[in-house]
């Protein structure tokens, strides 16, 4: 009698705002393991896993493009580059922008129009 091997239950990686690049690499490995190759599915699944300010950023993008027709929702490379720009602590431009928002008493969601302008969306 042969035993059937159980499928490996791999959890999606936990979002790490301190190292977005590692999170993206882990997510890519998860998608490959689970044979998910459609870019829009990858983006939406990953977007649903974001937490904190990253989740606020993602939901603000969903509000702007409700039909999810824009490049952010259909181009994996573009999505991950925007995510890194927004949350990678080594990005001096975004650090300065976030400090400015803090001084003004705003958060990224309240300043959504400014983010659209900065990102060129």
Image (spheres, rainbow, N blue to C red):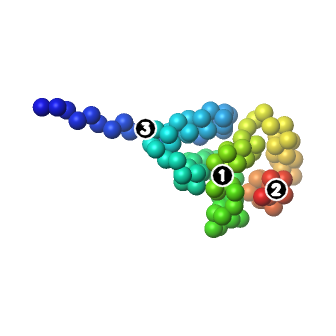
Inter-mark Cα distance, 2 to 3: 36 Å
Residue beneath the point at 82% across and 56% down: 120
Inter-mark Cα distance, 1 to 2: 15 Å
Secondary structure of the residue carrying numbered label 1? loop
Nearest the viewer among 47 and 29 is 29
Asked if residue 48 is positioned above or below residue 31 in the image, the reply reads below
Residue with the mark numbered 3: 10
If the image is split into quadrants, where does the C terminus sit? bottom right
Residue with the mark numbered 1: 75
Q: Which label number is shown at residue 120?
A: 2
Secondary structure of the residue carrying numbered label 2? loop
Residue beneath the point at 75% across and 45% down: 86
Relative to 64, 40 lies left or right:
left
**Residue 29 appears at what percent x and percent y?**
52, 36
**Residue 8 appears at what percent x and percent y?**
36, 36
Q: Earlier in the sequence, mark 1 or mark 2?
A: 1
Residue beneath the point at 65% across and 67% down: 66
Q: Earlier in the sequence, mark 1 or mark 3?
A: 3
């Amino acid at each position: 009698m042969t035993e059937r091997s159980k499928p490996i239950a791999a959890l999606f990686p936990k979002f790490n705002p301190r190292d977005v690049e590692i999170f993206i690499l882990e997510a890519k490995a998860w998608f490959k393991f689970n044979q998910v190759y459609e870019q829009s599915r990858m983006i939406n699944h990953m977007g649903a896993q974001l937490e904190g300010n990253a989740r606020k950023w993602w939901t603000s993008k969903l509000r702007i493009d409700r039909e999810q027709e824009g490049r952010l929702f259909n181009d994996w490379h573009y999505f991950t580059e925007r995510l890194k720009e927004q949350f990678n602590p080594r990005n001096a431009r975004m650090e300065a922008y976030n400090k400015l928002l803090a001084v003004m008493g705003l958060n990224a969601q309240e300043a959504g129009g400014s983010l659209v302008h900065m990102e060129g969306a």
